[in-house]
Image (cartoon, grey):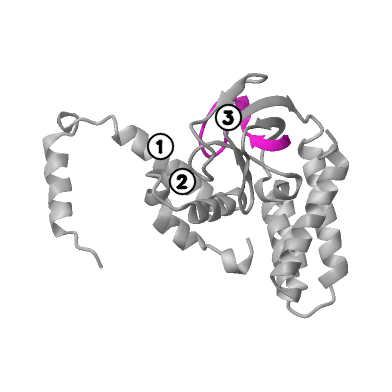
Amino acid sequence: MRLDREITCAQVVDLVTAYLEDVLDADDRERVEEHLVFCDGCSTYLDQIRQTIAVTGRLEPEDIPPALQDKLLAAFREWSPA
Amino acid sequence: MTAYKFLGDGSVSPFAGFRWPVGEWVEAAAADPCRRGIHACRVQDVPFWLGHGLWEIELDGEIVVYQRKIVAPRGRLVRRLTDWNRELLEEFGAGVLARTRTRFGAVAVLSGYVGDIQNHLASGRVPLAAFAAARAAELSGGPAEYERERLRQAAWLADRLGLGTA
């Protein structure tokens, strides 16, 4: 896309959640989609996120083994934004 | 009006995932770019959205023109343009490469794009090659040159596919 409309792969990654939740404005949405047409890497990444959402969206808390639940909760507790 | 739309296997739209019926009117609540509505290409938009299958679509209702697309409240898939296939895509890419080589092959820095485009084509990434050609043009003469290269690409596709003649 034109330099004044440029969106980088890193920016696409940052915007993927907003894209999938349909909260991007029309201009940003078009820029993301224009990028996806020619960027195989971002296209694959978006597909992976979609698949992840589809799979994890079907998970119930009881589907997760207790040991894994504890591990995940511990990881979330230790996580902090950079 | 007649417009164009790229769809994947099974006439599924690449972004919305909607499976298009052929010949039936599809209605949207409104024509709101990138949100609701039937999104399609004018001839000049086609190079930006190169994809698997190219279809002719009839649009109806009040049409909203956006930057790289048009949006209508109603649309009907008319026919698949069977001339749009791998061979034509590769021919399109070869033309893009030849033009970029002619224009910038001897220009410092920009000549690097010729090799990039060759590599993209060798790996089957024609949309990326077309983008790279437009970027080389832009670096030579600004945003207007980017648009002009995209228009050249659209003109080639229109000529070979008979776009805009319906």
Depth check: B130 or A5 in front? A5
Q: Residue at x 58, y 29 (%)?
A: B12
Q: Is A64 colored magenta in this rendering?
A: no
Q: Callout 2, which amino acid?
A: Leu
Image position, residue B116 (x, y; %)? 71, 63
Q: Residue at x 11, y 44 (%)?
A: A70
Instruction: Count neighbours of disc 1 (C-alpha within 10 A) and say few if under 14, some if 14 to 19, many if 20 or more.
Output: few
Q: Which mark is residue B12?
A: 3
List the residue tagged with mark 2. Answer: A46
Instruction: Count neighbours of disc 3 (C-alpha within 10 A) and say few if under 14, some if 14 to 19, many if 20 or more.
Output: some
Viewer-nearest of discs 3 and 2 = 3
Q: Callout 1, which amino acid?
A: Gln
Q: CA distance from mark 3 to mark 2?
A: 17 Å
For the residue labelled by badge 2, is the local secondary structure a helix, a strand or a loop? helix
The quadrant the N terminus of chain B occupies is top right
Chain of the residue where label 3 is placed in the rendered structure: B
Q: Callout 3, which amino acid?
A: Val
User: Could one spot residue B136 in this view of the protein?
Assistant: no
Depth check: B137 or B96 in front? B137
List the residue tagged with mark 1. Answer: A51
Image position, residue B24 (x, y; %)? 63, 19
Q: Are marks 1 and 2 in contact (CB under 8 Å)?
A: no
Callout 3 and callout 2 share a chain: no
For the residue labelled by badge 1, is the local secondary structure a helix, a strand or a loop? helix
Which contiguous range is marked in magenta? B1-20
The quadrant the C terminus of chain B occupies is top right
User: Could one spot residue B44 in this view of the protein?
Assistant: yes
